[in-house]
Image (cartoon, rainbow, N blue to C red):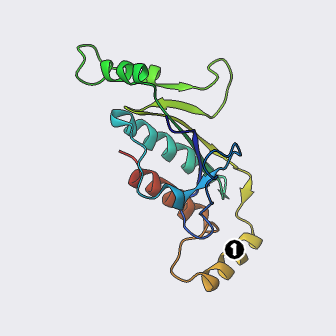
Amino acid sequence: MLPWLRYDIKGCEVSRWTDPSPEGDQQVVVLKDLNFEGQFITLGQQRSWLLLQVDIDTTYLQRLNVLDYSLLLGQQTLQPDEQLQVLSSGPSSPEPRDLRAQNRRLLPDLKNPLHVIDGPEQRYFIGIIDIFTVYTFRKRLEHLWKTVRHPGRSFSTVSPQTYCLRLCDWIRDHSK
């Protein structure tokens, strides 16, 4: 079984790579966008729920003039018996699949932003974090400086509208 993998996703490329832990190292490393390239969040029919929820959340943050938040994505390989359970409740079963059972809160009795979603082979832990950076005059200057320093590349500091759209596009492009 593969170890837990954790990602901090912003939907951009500048400074978005982290060296993974060496094999056997117990250190927890949170990977970034470029570490996820070539992979997908595989959810099947729950993909539409994820896309809608991220759109709702990021649109709300956009209205608050917030940027620099991240999609925290944890993934863990399902055990063979868990995979069978997910498959048996899939679209070919006679009764409709209860998406609420497959998309549940990590701590169901508490209000928390972390969802647990089982795909066919992976369990995903998903939430939006780091929601405290407001797009101020200083951030506008940082955007200008990064535009000159990293021409043609995507970086974190952009307008809240651009930030929102970019993260939603990243999730749409990296999920199936």
Figure check: 97 above or below 147:
above
Q: Secondary structure at mark 1?
A: helix
Which quadrant holds residue 15? bottom right
- Residue at 49 percent across and 47 percent down: it is 55
In the rendering, at what x and y percent does residue 11 appear?
53, 60
Using the rendered view, name the quadrant where residue 158 is placed.
Answer: bottom right
Q: Residue furthest right?
A: 138
| Lateral position of residue 159 relative to residue 26, left or right | left
Residue displayed at 55% across by 50% down: 59
Q: Is residue 48 above or below residue 99?
A: below
Question: Quick one: 167 or 13, which is closer to the camera?
Answer: 13
Q: Residue furthest front?
A: 24
Residue extending furthest toward the bottom = 148
Near mark 1 (Cα within 10 A), the count class, few <14, some 14-19 or many ≥20, is: some
Q: Quadrant of residue 141?
A: bottom right
Residue under label 1: 140
Which quarter of the figure is the C terminus placed in? Answer: top left
Q: Amino acid at mark 1?
A: Arg
User: Do we see residue 146 in this rendering?
Assistant: yes
User: Residue 91, position in %: x, y?
Assistant: 26, 25
What x and y, as percent, mark residue 20? 61, 55
Q: Is residue 98 visible?
A: no
The image position of residue 5, as x and y in percent, is 57, 43
* Residue at 45%, 51% in the rendered image: 171
